[in-house]
Image: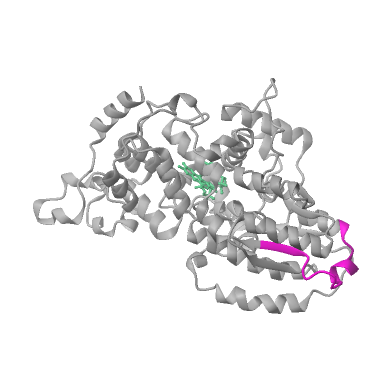
C-alpha cells in the first residue's frame, strides 16, 4: 500500500492516513520491501500553470518537509519527489506500483477539475487509487435542496448544512497513531532535517508551521478573539480574524478540526446562529459553500461565469488601469494600501479583497478573471474555490453574488473600516502626514507643493459608478 499526500499536508484528521494506518501492520511499516511508504510530489511546473504564488509554494514545501518528520513518528517514510507535472506524477506512480506490487494507492480527493482528471487517468492506467475526502466538514454533495440539487443561495445552504451537522454530527479523526508502538524511524527524521533547514530562509517564514498554529495561535484566537470577531473582522488595521486561510488552503489544518476545537469551547454554538461568535463558523460555511459549488459545477474551474447571462460582457480591460490597480496606484488610498499589502505580504484582509475586487470590475470594468489570476499569483492562501467564489461575488457574475447595482464607494468603505487611516498609513507611508479626516480622499488636501507624494485618482467614483450601471445593464 502506498500513501499519496496532496492537498492534505497533515497528520491530524487525515482520512487517507487514518485508513492506511488501520490497514498496515507495524511490522509492515518497518519492513524494507519498498523504498518508501508515502509520497508527496513537488510539481512546480504544474503549480505555476495553476498560477500558485511563490509564497504558497514555499509554505507547501515547508509543511511537506515537516511532515516527513511527523510521519517518521508513526514509522512512515515519506519521500518527497520532484516531478514537473501531473503527467509525470502518473508515470512515477504507475512504475512504482508495478515494481513494488502495490495493492492500493491511498489519497484524499481534490475538488479541482485538473486534479479530478489526473485521478481519473490514474485509474485508467491501472493505478489502484482509493480516495477519501478531507477538505470539508460535511461531505460534498450531502447538502442539497428538496429537488436534490445544490443550493444557489448561501443562506438556505447554511441552514441545511447546520441541520445536517446537528443530525449526523461530523467525523473528526484526531491525530495519526500506529497500532503498536514501535520506535520512530530515526533515519527518516535525520535525512530530511537538512532539507527542512535549507528552506528556512524563505518567503513564507513569518507564517509559522501549522503545528504552532494548532498549539498557540488557534487557542489564543478562540479564547481571546472569537468573542470580538463580529466587531473586529472588518477592520483591516486590527488582527481580528484567525489568519488560518493559508493552512486550510494547503490542507495543513483540517476544517473539521477547527469546528471540533471551537465546539469544545462553545458546545452550543451551532444552535446559537445569532451569537456574535457564530459569525466565524459562518465563514467556515462560506468556505464549504464554495467548495460545493466547484464540486457541482466543475466548469467554474474553467473560467466560466456562474451566471451565464454575464458570459458575453465586453470588459474594457484597459491595460494601464490594470497595471495601476496591481501596483497600488489608483489614487484611492484604501485600494492602493490593500494592493500593497498583497504585493508585500502575500495576504490581504477579506474586507479589502471585496473592495479591490469591486473596484477592478466595477470602477475599471476589467474582467474579474484578470483579478482572480493576479490574486492566485500573489496570495499565500490562494484557493480556487474561495478565490473564484469571492471574485464572482464581487463582479456580480457568481452564485448568490452582489447584485450588479451594488457598487462599493471606495472612499466610503475607507471611512467606515479604516476611520483613522491606520491601515492606509501602514502601507502608504507617503500619506502619513495627511490628517485622519482627509486620508480617505487626500487630493483635496494635497497642495501644489506636495503634489508628487501621491497619484491622482485614475477614475472618478461618481462617473465610474454610472458607467458600470449602464455597462452591466
Ligand atoms: C475576491 C476574494 C478573493 C478571495 N480569495 C480567497 C482565496 O484565494 N483563498 C481563501 O482561502 N479565501 C479567499 N477569500 C475569502 C477570504 O477573504 C479569506 O478566506 C479570509 O480573508 C482569510 O482570512 P482568515 O483566515 O483570517 O479568515 P477568518 O475570518 O478567520 O475565517 C476563518 C476561515 O473561514 C474561511 N473564510 C473566511 N471568509 C471566507 C469567504 N469570504 N469565503 C470563503 N471562505 C471564507 C477561510 O477558510 C478562513 O480561514 C477571498 C475573498 C474575496 C472577496
Quadrant location of the N terminus?
Answer: bottom right
Q: Position of residue 427 (x, y in %)?
A: 33, 57
Q: Position of residue 359 (x, y in %)?
A: 34, 39
Quadrant location of the C terminus?
Answer: top left
Q: Is residue 176 visible?
A: no
Using the image, determine if residue 348 lies above or below residue 209.
above
Start-end of magenta stretch: 23-40
Q: Tell me which residue sits at (72%, 67%) in the image.
A: 78
Q: Position of residue 368 (x, y in %)?
A: 41, 38
Using the image, determine if residue 196 lies above or below residue 52.
below
Q: Tell me which residue sits at (72%, 39%) in the image.
A: 139
Q: Position of residue 77 (x, y in %)?
A: 76, 69
Count the labels in the image.
0
Q: Is residue 418 visible?
A: yes
Quarter occupied by residue 174 = bottom right
Instruction: Inspect the magenta stretch and tell me whether residue 29 lies in it.
Output: yes
In-front residue for pair 405/412: 405
- Indicate left or right for 16 with 395 as reference: right
Quarter occupied by residue 288 = top right
In-front residue for pair 348/133: 133
Q: Tell me which residue sits at (32%, 39%) in the image.
A: 317
- Indicate left or right for 82 with 148 as reference: left
Instruction: Inspect the magenta stretch and tell me whether residue 395 lies in it.
Output: no
- What colour scheme has been applied to the protein in the rendered image? one colour
Using the image, determine if residue 150 lies above or below residue 92.
above
In-front residue for pair 469/49: 49
Using the image, determine if residue 188 lies above or below residue 298.
below
Amino acid at each position: 500500500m502506498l500513501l499519496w499526500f496532496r492537498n492534505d499536508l497533515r497528520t491530524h484528521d487525515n482520512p487517507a492516513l487514518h485508513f492506511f494506518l488501520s490497514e498496515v501492520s507495524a511490522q509492515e511499516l518497518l519492513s524494507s520491501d519498498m523504498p518508501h511508504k508515502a509520497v508527496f510530489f513537488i510539481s512546480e511546473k504544474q503549480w505555476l500553470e495553476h498560477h500558485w504564488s511563490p509564497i504558497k509554494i514555499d509554505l507547501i514545501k515547508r509543511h511537506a518537509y515537516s511532515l516527513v518528520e511527523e510521519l517518521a513518528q508513526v514509522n512512515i517514510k515519506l519521500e518527497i519527489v520532484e516531478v514537473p507535472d501531473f503527467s509525470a506524477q502518473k508515470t512515477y506512480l504507475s512504475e512504482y506500483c508495478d515494481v513494488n506490487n502495490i495493492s492500493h494507492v491511498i489519497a484524499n480527493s481534490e475538488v479541482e477539475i485538473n486534479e479530478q482528471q489526473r485521478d481519473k487517468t490514474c485509474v485508467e492506467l491501472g493505478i489502484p487509487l482509493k480516495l477519501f475526502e478531507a477538505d470539508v466538514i460535511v461531505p460534498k454533495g450531502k447538502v442539497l435542496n428538496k429537488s436534490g440539487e445544490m443550493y444557489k443561495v448561501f443562506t438556505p445552504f447554511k441552514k441545511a448544512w447546520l441541520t445536517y451537522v446537528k443530525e449526523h454530527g461530523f467525523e473528526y479523526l484526531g491525530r495519526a497513531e500506529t497500532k503498536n508502538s514501535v520506535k520512530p524511524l530515526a533515519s527518516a527524521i535525520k535525512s530530511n532535517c537538512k532539507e527542512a533547514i535549507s528552506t528556512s530562509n524563505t518567503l513564507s517564514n513569518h507564517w509559522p508551521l501549522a503545528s504552532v498554529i494548532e498549539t498557540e495561535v488557534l487557542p489564543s484566537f478562540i479564547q481571546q478573539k472569537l468573542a470580538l470577531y463580529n466587531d473586529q473582522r472588518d477592520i483591516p488595521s486590527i488582527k481580528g480574524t484567525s489568519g488560518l486561510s493559508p493552512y486550510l488552503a494547503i490542507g495543513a489544518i483540517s476544517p473539521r478540526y477547527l469546528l471540533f476545537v471551537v465546539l469544545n469551547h462553545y458546545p452550543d454554538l451551532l444552535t446559537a446562529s445569532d451569537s456574535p461568535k457564530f459569525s466565524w463558523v459562518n465563514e467556515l460555511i462560506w468556505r464549504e459553500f464554495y467548495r460545493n459549488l466547484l464540486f457541482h459545477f466543475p466548469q467554474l474551474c474553467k473560467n466560466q461565469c456562474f451566471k451565464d447571462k454575464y458570459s458575453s460582457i465586453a470588459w474594457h480591460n484597459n491595460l494601464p488601469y490594470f497595471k495601476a490597480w496591481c501596483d497600488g496606484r489608483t489614487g484611492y488610498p484604501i485600494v492602493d494600501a490593500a494592493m500593497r499589502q498583497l504585493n508585500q505580504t502575500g495576504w490581504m484582509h477579506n474586507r479589502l479583497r471585496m473592495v479591490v475586487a469591486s473596484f477592478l470590475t466595477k470602477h475599471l470594468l476589467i474582467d474579474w478573471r484578470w483579478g482572480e489570476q493576479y490574486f492566485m499569483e500573489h496570495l499565500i492562501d490562494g484557493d480556487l474555490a474561495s478565490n473564484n467564489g469571492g471574485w464572482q461575488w464581487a463582479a456580480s457574475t457568481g452564485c448568490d453574488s452582489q447584485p450588479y447595482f451594488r457598487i462599493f464607494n471606495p472612499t466610503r468603505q475607507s471611512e467606515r473600516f479604516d476611520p483613522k487611516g491606520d491601515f492606509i498609513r501602514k502601507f502608504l507611508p507617503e500619506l502619513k502626514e495627511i490628517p485622519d479626516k482627509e486620508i480617505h480622499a487626500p487630493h483635496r488636501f494635497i497642495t501644489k507643493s506636495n503634489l508628487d507624494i501621491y497619484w491622482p485618482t485614475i477614475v472618478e467614483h461618481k462617473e465610474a459608478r454610472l458607467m458600470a450601471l449602464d455597462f452591466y445593464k
